[in-house]
Image (cartoon, grey):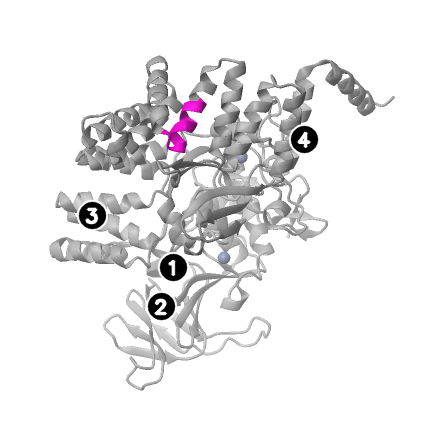
């Protein structure tokens, strides 16, 4: 008998004798039904199990979690009550009280939660329940047990202070502490807490706005304007925000002037870090730096040459330059639409800083520094607009800058750059240059492979890849460091291949404990499969796909994983929480009317949501895959567990989202790669762990 058969038979034998095994097999069956969205079948399976054995406490818990996941809180409550009728467990009693609070049954929740707080004053969930309860009490006189609304806010502040002390990495606790402190006119604590929330999780973007308001009230106009800038970069279309900023600018003209001068000074003093020579590659990547812009400011320490754009396929004598610009000066590239142009034709112009016209053009031009070691520098390049880290930055680029005129719109800015130089410009923007060398090397191989697999991505806009997180963040030569350039050189030309083809070697910051299958996340047949991102000796009670109760625990608890990191700068969100108001949901899905329910309908094997529904009075709307993150306000990942807060009348007012990981969770987990490298693993071992189906080859 071979070994596999023996193990199988042995396990069958044990399973018939140990209740642990039957619980395990129930969990497995639940998991595969649940993550495919077969909720009625999942519930039936549990009800059958409970008919067999009404004292099956695990089944009652599974039933409660299943109903919770679907927004059925009355059903959840009854499952918890059935559990408690059979067995006393203070944690289930606590979950019952929290369910009452979430249901808006405050009359029952208040005595239960207060009793629990008296017995377990340190318990995080109890503190959280109390904080939510007191905030509701501050807003609603009918349920208030405190003398005034102010007292209720103060009580909420007490619990939130205890929570931020107990869990210093939870951005939602800091955010709520900031909000509550603002209501009780405690601006110092509010500002500190907003700062902490943003440090932990920059997607709490509204913090910039509230900080700006508080700073303006304190007449700290410079700082206030900085916060408005950040807020506007995230929400470029928010007119109210712009008006507020203009108002502060008007109140503080000198602060604004000083700030503009400082920006120009920074730009003048901008120096290129010492450049490291890179290996050459035969491949040129066209990176989109900006689309549909109408103004650009540039300079170079060396003379600048402007050529008509060449087509890559026709080698021949280098054409004569259209212009050669003296070094060290500032130049502008400007688009004038027909109504603005003196000739009444739209024009594209290259002019001096003071406005002298040096060149008019209508076809694409190439701009390059005459000395490759002294590249072109651009002022306030818009980068990652619309993301919470969006801003304008001074940037420098190797090789050629192409200006592509776009009739009636403006122009696109493209960097035509060698593959190795591109990799060098991406690496420090996608991984901290202080990270272990083997992790940096793995990331360099991944960056190169991913770029090559995405060359058609932006063909319609005239380039291969963009410079934002949509493709890979590319900071140009100014972002390069000695350590990252060395990792690029040590892996020069290396890519990940499967059967002779470069694979789409995607990566994300933190996978949350198990990576996703490429096919499950985005469809298609790619050789990138999900892996457990932890030593198999841990989490033995967890099986993928996850049953309702294991999913709730997997997301809410701090499980062991390679990417569980809290001390690391920028990566304190292995598990996270955020909130989403019903108003925000209704703004994004106005067609559904007043919102009743928000629930995940389908999940990948790793537990990530890939179908979400919002239901309202007038209808329903589904969101799929990556669009879910944007719809939920730019949350960190799709590994989520959503819980509503209902009001007195049974309407949801707010959703609390528990989450894990950061990014899409497919391919290499960067924080996991960091941990593996610290643990002594080499570049090739790290890549084999995350891409078990690929080999490292020279491209
Ligand atoms: Zn892109
Ligand atoms: Zn991971």
Residue 151 or 499: which is nearer the viewer?
151
Q: Which of marks 3 and 1 is nearer the N terminus?
A: 3
- CA gap, disc 3 and disc 2: 40 Å
Question: Who's the residue at 38% across and 45% down the image?
Answer: 582
Question: Who's the residue at 34% across and 28% down the image?
Answer: 106
Would you say the magenta stretch is mainly helix, strand or loop? Answer: helix
The range drawn in magenta is 95-105
Residue 474 is situated, as x and y percent measured from the top left of the image, at 45, 53
Q: For the residues carrying marks 4 and 3, which lies nearer the camera in this image? A: 4
Residue 640 is situated, as x and y percent measured from the top left of the image, at 49, 38
- Mark number, residue 29: 4
Contact (Cβ within 8 Å) of mark 3 with mark 1: no
Name the quadrant of the N terminus.
top right
Question: Who's the residue at 30% across and 33% down the image?
Answer: 136
Q: For the residues carrying marks 3 and 2, which lies nearer the camera in this image? A: 3
Q: Is 588 positioned to the left or the right of 221 in the image? A: right
| Magenta stretch holds residue 567 | no
Q: Earlier in the sequence, mark 4 or mark 3?
A: 4
Q: Is 4 positioned to the left or the right of 590 in the image? A: right
Q: Name the residue under label 3.
A: 224
Q: Earlier in the sequence, mark 2 or mark 4?
A: 4
- CA gap, disc 2 and disc 4: 69 Å
Residue 474 or 10: which is nearer the viewer?
10
Q: Residue furthest bottom?
A: 343
Question: Who's the residue at 42% across and 49% down the image?
Answer: 480
From the viewer's perspective, is residue 287 above or below residue 540? below
| Magenta stretch holds residue 97 | yes
Q: Which of marks 3 and 2 is nearer the N terminus?
A: 3
- Mark number, residue 303: 2
Q: In which quarter of the image is residue 343?
A: bottom left
- CA gap, disc 3 and disc 1: 36 Å
């Amino acid at each position: 008998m071979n070994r596999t058969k023996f193990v199988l038979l042995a396990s069958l034998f044990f399973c018939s004798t140990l209740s642990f095994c039957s619980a395990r097999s129930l969990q497995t069956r639940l998991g595969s039904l649940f993550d495919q969205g077969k909720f009625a079948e999942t519930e039936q399976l549990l009800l059958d199990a409970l008919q067999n054995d009404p004292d099956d406490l695990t089944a009652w818990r599974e039933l409660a979690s299943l109903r919770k996941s679907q927004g059925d809180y009355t059903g959840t409550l009854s499952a918890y009550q059935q559990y408690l009728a059979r067995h006393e467990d203070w944690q289930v009693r606590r979950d019952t009280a929290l369910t009452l609070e979430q249901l808006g049954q405050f009359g029952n929740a208040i005595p239960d939660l207060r009793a629990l707080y008296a017995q377990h004053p340190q318990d995080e969930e109890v503190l959280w329940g109390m904080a939510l309860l007191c905030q509701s009490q501050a807003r609603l006189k009918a349920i208030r047990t405190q003398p005034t609304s102010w007292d209720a806010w103060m009580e909420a502040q007490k619990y939130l202070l205890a929570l931020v002390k107990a869990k210093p990495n939870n951005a939602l606790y800091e955010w709520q502490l900031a909000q509550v402190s603002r209501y009780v006119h405690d601006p110092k604590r509010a500002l500190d807490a907003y700062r902490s929330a943003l440090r932990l999780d920059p997607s709490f973007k509204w913090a910039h706005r509230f900080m700006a308001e508080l700073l303006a009230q304190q007449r700290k106009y410079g700082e206030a304007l900085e916060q408005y800038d950040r807020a506007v970069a995230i929400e470029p279309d928010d007119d109210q925000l712009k008006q507020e900023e203009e108002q502060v600018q008007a109140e503080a003209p000198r602060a604004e002037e000083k700030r503009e001068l400082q920006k120009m000074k920074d730009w003048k003093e901008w120096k290129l870090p010492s450049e490291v020579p890179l290996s050459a590659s035969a491949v040129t990547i066209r990176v989109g730096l900006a689309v549909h812009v109408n103004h650009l400011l540039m300079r170079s320490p060396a003379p600048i040459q402007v050529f008509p754009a060449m087509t890559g396929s026709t080698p021949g004598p280098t054409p004569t330059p259209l212009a050669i610009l003296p070094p060290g000066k500032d130049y502008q590239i400007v688009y004038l639409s027909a109504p603005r142009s003196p000739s009444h034709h739209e024009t594209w112009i290259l002019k001096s800083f003071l406005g002298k016209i040096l060149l008019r053009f209508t076809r694409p031009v190439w701009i390059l520094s005459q000395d490759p070691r002294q590249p072109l520098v651009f002022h306030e390049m818009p980068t990652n607009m619309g993301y919470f880290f969006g801003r304008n930055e001074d940037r420098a680029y190797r090789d050629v800058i192409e200006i592509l005129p776009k009739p009636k719109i403006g122009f696109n800015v493209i960097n035509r750059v060698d593959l190795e130089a591109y990799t060098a410009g991406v690496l420090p923007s996608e991984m901290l240059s202080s990270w272990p060398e083997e992790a940096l090397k793995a990331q360099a191989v991944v960056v190169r492979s991913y770029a090559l697999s995405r060359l058609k991505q932006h063909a319609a806009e005239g380039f291969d890849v963009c410079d934002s997180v949509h493709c890979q963040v590319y900071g140009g030569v100014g972002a390069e460091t000695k350590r990252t350039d060395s990792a690029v050189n040590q892996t020069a030309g290396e890519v990940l291949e499967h059967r002779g083809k470069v694979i789409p070697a995607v990566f994300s910051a933190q996978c949350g404990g198990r990576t996703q299958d490429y096919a499950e996340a985005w469809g298609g047949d790619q050789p990138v499969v999900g892996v457990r991102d932890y030593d198999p000796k841990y989490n033995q009670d967890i099986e993928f796909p996850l049953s309702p109760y294991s999913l709730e625990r997997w997301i809410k608890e701090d499980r062991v994983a390679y990417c569980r990191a809290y001390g690391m700068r920028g990566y304190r969100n292995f598990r996270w929480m955020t909130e989403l108001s019903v108003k925000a949901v209704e703004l994004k899905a106005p067609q559904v009317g007043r919102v009743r329910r928000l629930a995940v309908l389908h999940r990948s094997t790793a537990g990530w949501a890939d179908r979400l529904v919002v239901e309202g009075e007038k209808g329903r709307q589904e969101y799929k895959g990556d669009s879910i993150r944007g719809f939920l306000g730019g949350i960190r990942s799709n590994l989520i567990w959503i819980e509503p807060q209902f009001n007195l009348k049974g309407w949801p007012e707010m959703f609390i989202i528990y989450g894990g990981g950061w990014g899409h969770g497919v391919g290499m987990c960067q924080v996991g790669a960091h941990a593996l490298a610290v643990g002594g693993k080499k570049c090739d071992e790290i890549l084999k762990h995350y891409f078990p189906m690929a080999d490292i080859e020279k491209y």
